[in-house]
Image (cartoon, rainbow, N blue to C red):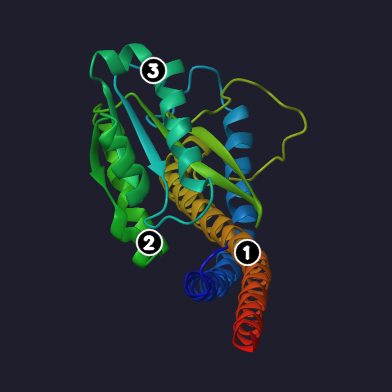
Amino acid sequence: MPNLKDIRIRINSVKTTRQVTSAMKMVSAAKFKKAQDDISHIRPYVERLAGIIFDLSQSLEEGVEFEWSKEREPNKILLVTLSSNRGLCGGFNSSVIKETEKVIKTQFHYQFKQGDVDILAIGKQAQKILKSRGYPVLKDYNDLYSDVTFESVKEIANEVMEAYLKGKYDRIVLIYNEFKNAAVQEIRSDQFLPLQLATGEVNTNTVDYIVEPDKVAFIEKVIPEALQTMFYRVVLESLASEHGARMTSMHKATDNATEMLSDLQLVYNKARQGAITTEILEIVGGAEALKK
């Protein structure tokens, strides 16, 4: 029979854990609401902006090239991984790490063996684990999550874009969790640069835009701003996914703690009942012995 004192210690421990997980769930729920609102606001803007660039590029003459969309031989690769700074968010971080390893092994295995794959980590969890597994994490931006604004994200996007323009990298891939809902996040690995356009492919369904001074100049002007906004969207997708995953994870942990408390209370009651029965038997046995 378990010791009553040990059971009481376990009950108090589980109660404390339940209080912590419940508080974390409430904090994540508050952050999740804001992150969800941010995503719902930026998605239509980014999709429309990308649609305009795509439509205009389709109407250009074949052979027109932009520095952002020139296809190169993928000799030098940069993977940008977005995870979280803290754990306790289910499979959110592990999915990013698994996808990063999968991309390296399936798409860039040769480049990795040649030492031509670099990783830029946004989030301590991916940085720590990927480094421990021997992957080349050259830089991190873990402080970004303390103040996620367009300006702070734009600085990182500009640094990545500049490295591409200077020829330091031939292909840049973003690996992140795309937000679906609080319980569901879809892992994605999207090519960020070179930007994939559809020049020379005429689509009769595209909108006929009036552009000044001309389409080429407009696209050259808009693409850098569009890339910055796309990068910002990816960061917001990851952030909303993190808060949703943590809220769901802490909700499950709170429910499990409540169930465990119920089981422990039942064990405690049985043990206490057994102890009382034993004491009664000892008293009765002592009384009978005195009569003799």
Decide if residue 135 is on the left or right side of residue 231: left
Up-down: is 114 above or below 48? above
Residue 24 in view (yes/no): yes
Q: In the image shown, does 11 or 124 lie closer to the viewer?
A: 11
Image marks 3 and 2: residues in contact by CB distance under 8 Å: no
Instruction: Name the amino acid, label 2.
Output: Tyr
- As helix, strand or loop, the secondary structure at mark 1 comes to helix
Q: Position of residue 56 (x, y in %)?
A: 60, 36
Instruction: Name the amino acid, label 3.
Output: Phe
> What is the crowding at mark 3: few (fewer than 14 residues within 10 Å), some, or many (at least 20)?
some
Q: Earlier in the sequence, mark 2 or mark 1?
A: 2
Q: Earlier in the sequence, mark 1 or mark 3?
A: 3
In this rendering, the label closer to the viewer, 1 or 3:
1
Q: Position of residue 55 (x, y in %)?
A: 64, 35
Q: Position of residue 120 (x, y in %)?
A: 30, 40
Quarter of the picture containing the C terminus is bottom right
- As helix, strand or loop, the secondary structure at mark 3 comes to loop
Q: Rounded to the nearest whole Å, what is the CA distance between mark 2 and mark 1?
A: 34 Å
Up-down: is 290 above or below 114? below
- Quick one: which residue is furthest to the front in this view? 292
For mark 1, what is the residue?
260
Up-down: is 77 above or below 87? above
Classify residue 66 by image quadrant: top left
For mark 2, what is the residue?
145
For mark 3, what is the residue?
108
Q: Residue at x 36, y 17 (%)?
A: 74
Decide if residue 205 is on the left or right side of residue 184: right
Q: Earlier in the sequence, mark 3 or mark 2?
A: 3
